[in-house]
Amino acid sequence: MRVNEIFYSLQGEGRYTGTAAVFIRLAGCNMRCDFCDTRHETYIELSEDEIVRQAASYPARHVVVTGGEPTLQLTPSLVDKLHEAGKFVQIETNGTIALSLDLLPKIEWITCSPKTLPVKIQHIDEVKVVYRGQDITRYEALAEACGAMRSLQPCDEDDPEKNALNLAAAIEYIKAHPAWRLSLQTHKIMNIR
């Protein structure tokens, strides 16, 4: 598999914020979002066993498979091996790729941060919208249809003034639509990975 990096930190976003987690960042993405803050193009080739060995070397049970777009490479056998190592598997996806029916039920938590609708992924536990003040009515409908948790994450535009506006807009939106929760990129606030 093409692996950009494997590292140990705290989950900084969404439902599991603050949870110790092993991050498996797979290389490559099928979208080119102008606000993407992840450099995922470089990679080394690792076998599934090598990936699991590295993930198992950390004490946390929680594993986050992310990218890029993890569904371009994620396999049922990798998830099975992570489970055999005692791990809980979360993925962070843009939702543009349907999961195989033998993979879908193996993943304990699916965070979908849709950049385009409709999504193709068949199950979502958390809809996480990167927010710049846009109309999110369609994302609301997606979360409702899935029975998913709703997270609104102010877009980090690498500009303090724009970031302050995005945060203020997200707070006001959530106050008016309390089914949504604020998701901050706490790893950036804490200056950790």
Image (cartoon, rainbow, N blue to C red):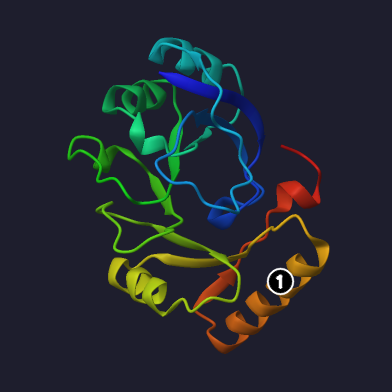
| Residue type (three-letter) at the residue carrying disc 1 | Leu
Q: Residue at x 75, y 48 (%)?
A: 188
Task: Find disc 1 in the rendering and name its residue.
Answer: 167
Query: Residue 161 appears in which quarter of the rendering?
Result: bottom right
Q: Residue at x 79, y 52 (%)?
A: 189
Number of callouts in the render? 1
On the rendered structure, is 192 left or right of 128? right
Determine the secondary structure under disc 1.
Answer: helix
On the rendered structure, is 9 left or right of 152? right
Residue 187 on image: x %, y % = 72, 46
* Front residue (pair 109, 75): 75
Residue 39 on image: x %, y % = 61, 35
123 w.r.t. 54: above or below: below
Q: Quadrant of the C terminus?
A: top right
Q: Residue furthest toward the left?
A: 101
Residue 48 on image: x %, y % = 39, 15
Q: Residue at x 57, y 71 (%)?
A: 181
